Amino acid sequence: MIIRWVSEDGKRKWIYPVERDIYTKGRIIKQVSTKAKVIGITKVNIPSPLHPIVPYYVMLLEDEYGNRMPKKTMREHKIGGTYELKAAATDGAVIITKIKYDIEEYLKESIKLVHAYELKPADKILIKPSIIEAAYAYQAVNTNPKVIDALINYLREKGIEDIAVGEQAMLGNDVTDAANKAGILDVCKKHDVPFIDLSKAEYAEKTADGFSFRIAKDAIDRKVINVPAMKTNSQIGISGAMENMIRVTDERTQKRMFEEDIEKTLPKLIKELPKFLTVGDATIGLHAQGPTSMGEPAFLNMLFVSKDPAALDSVFVEAGLFKMPQYLKEAAAIGLGNTDTKSIEIIGDDLEAIKQHLKCPEKDATSHPHIKLIDGKADPYIFNSALKMTAKLVGLLGYEMRLAIGLHFSEEDLAGKNRLVAYGKDAIKRTRELGAKTAAEIPEDIDDMEKIALLKSVLESEEKSRITIADKLKSKFAGFGSKIKTRF
């Protein structure tokens, strides 16, 4: 697609969005072309960090208005040939779109390329973004509000009035605070679209393969457009089309999904949900220590669109040169979607052309350099709480310690870990089963200041191998003091 912003008198053009002609104060006309002629092509044989796979080609395209734009491709095109994207021929296709300035136009064109996807004025739409914690839009933790804004505009153009935005935050966070800081509440107010806290929704129970899911009725009764922020996830590899739908279930369901191994239960949930469209938001994207604000913005400028969430996630994994997550292997095993990128129909940008080395997450990292996780696939509340507690200790000197969370870790995972703290009932249960020696056991239901005080006592003492009664009393006083301070 080639877009230009042109002055009303046609004398001036801009390659970026302009609202008014600064010379005449006249209005701006947008020129949009989806068809172009190849007027030049160059072969590149030298790799670079953003273009590691060679050889590739750079075409020079020209549209009917004489506007020109370079385009990277892995295939050699003939000069004089026509470059135009055709709609997907299969339901499992993934549309990959590189964005230049105008998210709304690229979003519209991407959805048009999806095979047999119709939107009707009578449709009731639930937009399901990713809003897991209070973070600004530029941090790329949550879905970009510009994508939600563009999507609502597109739906309104289709004559659809019954639109809602629904999400719940990562367990332990407040979704309203998160949506407000992310700028998504402002978008909802702008369009007079209700924002639904799915943690307070009505639920319907569905059973699949012996597992009962309590699913928000809004995600069943409405046509869902899933809009995840595409990013890394230190627990399961990536957060994308599939992971984002965890939060249409209630709190207890989410905790049970992790207790029974999230990488096995997640594909079961997706298979049980009604079909949905995914618009994967990689307008910024997050890599390194995702999915929280410990991650780093990746500045990808892309959209991934598909009716097949497993295919979309698989394409994103390969685009970032990540290792295939176990949950996608489990999805393939139960026949959920297509995870074989060689057989997935790719429309838009070539998959090989967008590949780049994104930073993989470290499974044991926390905000504190001396506190490492042993993550037994802890549920979102424990995972979130553990990261928050360790972040409170940043800046304090200390000695290396290990924080075990969740149920799914083995004796080998604990081998050689001397200064070990079991955090949460699941980790306490598991370390006891394994007969592991722990410096402390910290249940999740005590006051946060107590948790921090107990962690601090282990962190600051090199010889500390066991929490003493004195340590526990100090932590109790710390928790009591925090309650008094909060009250007054």
Image: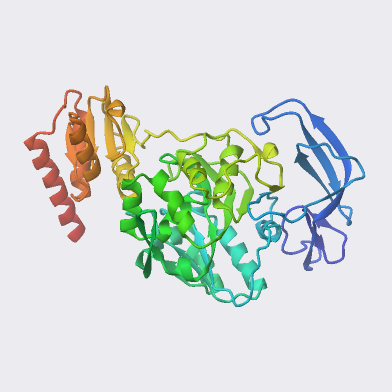
Query: Between 336 and 165, which is closer to the camera in this rendering?
Result: 336
Give above or below for 477 relative to 180: above
Residue 42 x, y percent position in the rendering: 84, 33
Residue 127 x, y percent position in the rendering: 52, 64
Horizontal arrangement in the rendering, residue 132 relative to residue 68 (left or right): left
Residue 124 x, y percent position in the rendering: 54, 73
What colouring does the structure picture have? rainbow
Residue 90 x, y percent position in the rendering: 68, 54
For the image, the number of numbered tags is 0
Query: Between 485 and 176, which is closer to the camera in this rendering?
Result: 176
Give above or below for 469 relative to 9: above
Task: Give residue 149's quadrant in the image.
Answer: bottom right
Residue at horizontal 53 percent and vertical 74 percent from the top: 192
Residue at the right extreme? Answer: 80
Horizontal arrangement in the rendering, residue 423 relative to residue 75 (left or right): left
Horizontal arrangement in the rendering, residue 117 relative to residue 69 (left or right): left
Residue at horizontal 50 percent and vertical 61 percent from the top: 128
| Any part of residue 299 in sight | no
Residue at horizontal 11 percent and vertical 46 percent from the top: 477
Give above or below for 124 relative to 283: below
Give above or below for 140 relative to 175: above
Query: Between 2 and 480, which is closer to the camera in this rendering?
Result: 2
| Any part of residue 404 in sight | yes
Residue at horizontal 79 percent and vertical 35 percent from the top: 57
Residue at the left extreme? Answer: 469
Query: Between 204 and 390, which is closer to the camera in this rendering?
Result: 204
Horizontal arrangement in the rendering, residue 383 relative to residue 86 (left or right): left
- The C terminus - image quarter: bottom left
